[in-house]
Amino acid sequence: MSDEHNPKMLGCYGHDKVQTPNLDRLAASGTRFTAAYTNSPICIPARASFATGRYPHETRCWDNAMPYDGEIRGWGHHLLDEGVRVDSIGKLHYRSEKANTGFSKQHHPMHVMDGIGQVWGSVRDPLPEARPAKMLNEIGQGESNYNRYDKLIADEACKWLEHSAAEHAAKPWVLFLGFVAPHFPLVVPVEFYSLYPLDTLPPRKLDPQEGYKQHPWIERMDNFSQVDRHLTPELRKMATAAYFGLCTFVDYQIGRVIDKLFEVGLDKETRIIYTSDHGDNVGARGLWGKSNMYEEAAGIPLIAAGADVPKGKVCRTPVTLVDAYQTILQGCGYEQKEDTATLPGRSWFNIANETDDPNRIAFSEYHAASSPSGAFMIRKGRYKFIYYVGYEPELFDLENDPEETVNLAGDKAYHHVIEECNSDLTRICDPNKTDRQAKDDQNTLIEKYGGRKRALHSGTPGATPVPGQGHE
């Protein structure tokens, strides 16, 4: 799992500039999912859903100050019960290494700093007028702590495959790798940055400086975080080049691990899954980072390969991170237990072997930093519906408008689509009650830190630091 990988920015997903040869090779040997989504476009809630197979309103890991602590059992706990070795290397972004989150051993884990996370992001009731973000203070070529950390993860993964995999060969094993690229800081070694000369980069899409009007919910969020407005045109291009370079950089690290898997002869009996916790806007609509329901941020890359996975297939069935629970259990030869029979997910391996089901529902929700209210997404068939508590909705026809340029929600001809999507949403949760529950939980947390004013200055200011390092 990488962090913050825009699903459009891989060669195998059709990008004509971003170079991802190793992930392209993986996709050619397996199945690529083109309608894959996070269950929340921010790290901690997404990763809690990945671990437990439950939506954020069920885990109540609403934001980056409410990390997963293992209290809700996940697929890792199930496998540990069966005696399966489950190791992790790299970023998990859970409460702490001490929390029982379903691993036999965590190697070089990254969790929320001091068990706290971004408390300031919980201050949303009401949302303060502004808190300029610090995500793009560093842009361009160089080497960050995150780059060094990802190299370490790949190094350690290669060692694990060479030495530990054989030790656990009697039973299935799971090795989870948590890379941090292409998450900001947008700094990358020169050999990757130089692949993307600034004068060759495409113009950003839906540029507010060229007349694009943000949705009011998005505009309120943008006024709070104020990321793009402080960038010059050149810095925007540098940020894009660095993000592209980070995509290639993490692809290179993943390629090293895949090559080692083949070198030690484990390729024929090992299933490989590549995905990300969420995407990144990379300047589209004047936005950077994640935190909304557009394809760039709520979409994720998803590739599965290995035994019984169709080769060279493109699967258009909507899928999300909650499906990982059944997928990983099936990959190890186990079925979910009765107490988890009501989980919403299905195995990606099964879905890959079936005829496409475009009407399967993908669901996502957001209750975290910079948002004035909850946002909810329903992807079903050709349509994507976005419900904002207290704001007008958005509806996009992704078949005719894959770049989400025309909001159809105000068109009476699509009233029946809105009604159907609303019905699908309310079968999953009551958005208004969920919004209130999230804010109540966040207000309780804020009080523990001494109230709103103190909470706004509590927690990680930007990217979560690498273990043993300070803030980026």
Image: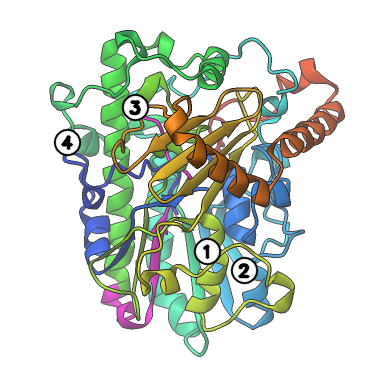
For label 3, the residue is 405
Tell whether position 280 is magenta: yes
Distance from Cα at disc 4 to Cα at disc 1? 34 Å
Q: Is residue 157 visible?
A: yes
Sequence-wise first label, 3 or 1: 1
Distance from Cα at disc 2 to Cα at disc 4? 39 Å
Q: Mark 4 touching mark 1, by CB under 8 A?
A: no
Q: Position of residue 154 (x, y in %)?
A: 38, 57
Between residue 390 and residue 455, name the one nearer to us: 390
Distance from Cα at disc 2 to Cα at disc 3? 38 Å
Determine which of the numbered discs, if any, sits on residue 195 in the image. Answer: 4
For label 2, the residue is 75
Query: From the viewer's perspective, is the residue at label 2 or at label 3 nearer?
Result: 3
Q: Position of residue 410 (x, y in %)?
A: 47, 24
* 419 vs 313: above or below: above
Residue at 37% over, 41% down: 6
Query: From the viewer's perspective, is the residue at label 2 or at label 1 nearer?
Result: 1
Distance from Cα at disc 4 to Cα at disc 3? 29 Å
What amino acid is labelled 4 in the image?
A: Leu
Between residue 236 and residue 109, name the one nearer to us: 236
Q: Is residue 67 left or right of residue 187?
A: right
Q: Position of residue 381 (x, y in %)?
A: 41, 51
Sequence-wise first label, 2 or 3: 2
Most distant residue in the bottom direction: 170
Magenta span of residues: 262-282
What kind of element bears circle 3? loop
